[in-house]
Image: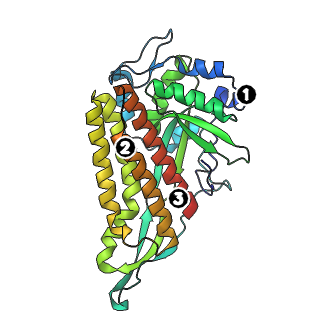
Amino acid sequence: MEYRRKRRTSSRRRSSGRTAARRGSTPPSEAGRAIVSLLMVGAIVYLISASAAGTWIAENIMAPMISAFSNRHDEAENGSQTVNATGTPDAGLSASVDLSAGTSPKNAVSTQVSLPALDCFMLQMGVYSSKSNAEAQAEALQAQGAGGYIMEDNSTGETRYRVMASGYDSAESAKSVKTRLVEDGIDCTVYELSTAAASFRVTASEEHIPQIEAGFSALEKAQSALSAAVIDFDKNSMSVEEGKTLALTILSALESDMGGLLSFDGTDATLSQLLDAYRDAKAALQALSGGAYESIVAFSAQLKHTLLYVTHRYAVLTDALL
């Protein structure tokens, strides 16, 4: 997927070490070595190494995945960067959104509404210049219960394909998984996909402001719920039907939160982009909840893939609006 990068999503070059060295020339045999030891055993183990170092059990990996962590300094010490296209810190950008058509001037009010900031720490398993190589690794990862999401990156002028296994809401969680994988000989890195809050001056009828605010925060809320669902599904040994119920709950909340904005569709360019992203996320959740799955592993993989897709789609949206 191609998209314009203007902010922190644009220059996250975390394909250092062996993963970066493989970029553009990794033969399928190397991709295979990076994934053959990834197994999903029920929901007790999240990503398990089956190499000589042994396996990981829940107490070694679930606790750090669930814990909250917001110290970016620790991530920076491990070679991570978070900059925008010009190498400078993010700066919020306000724009005007006029949804007051048909509203009496005396009933119209203006307020600041924001798309919330988002941080997702993705476990990156490989970076390729060949899409077919990326697809081969993604398919193998999905067969083992990982997301296998391919994120197209054109930030350097050269198209690269990043293959992601899953996403985490804290740096600590992602680094804990990475450390154990690397110790067991599986090459991977942590790729931080971050967006700044995008603020807008919205003018509308006062009675519609709460609905508009809910709509602007709905996608980030759905992404957060998906992140929690990925953990809950594996940790609690859920069935496919229970996982589908989780997905339907997230979908229902998204539809409810976005409902107040749908009546304004076609009235503002910024709103149109937000609604397009909403429809894409809705379609992904509908596919997740309505799909046919041969196993718990297959559903777990699709759940992670959906989380990564919705996260990336949100980054595309905020990039386009800033």
Q: Amino acid at mark 1?
A: Ser
Check disc 2 and report its element: helix, strand or loop: helix
Disc 3 is placed on an element classified as helix
Image mark for residue 220 = none
Q: Nearer the viewer, mark 1 or mark 3?
A: 1
Q: Is residue 165 left or right of residue 247?
A: right
CB under 8 Å between discs 1 and 3:
no
The x, y position of residue 217, in whole percent, is 38, 60
Q: Nearer the viewer, residue 89 or 195?
A: 195
Visible residue check, residue 170: no
Q: CA distance from mark 1 to mark 3?
A: 32 Å
Relative to 96, say whether 249 is above or below: above
The alpha-carbon separation of the residues under discs 2 and 1 comes to 34 Å
Residue receiving disc 3: 318
Residue at x 51% of width, y 33% of height? 148
- Residue named by callout 1: 25
Identity, as a three-letter code, of the amino acid under mark 2: Leu
Q: Is residue 218 visible?
A: yes
Q: Quadrant of residue 47?
A: top left
Q: Which disc, if any, is residue 226?
A: 2
Q: Name the spot of residue 251 as percent of width and height, x first.
A: 33, 50
Provide residue 101's location: percent of width, then percent of height: 41, 83
CA neighbours of label 3 inside 10 A, class few (<14), some (14 to 19), many (20+): many
**Nearest the eye: 316 or 247:** 247
| Model colouring | rainbow
Residue displayed at 31% across by 35% down = 232
Q: Earlier in the sequence, mark 3 or mark 2?
A: 2
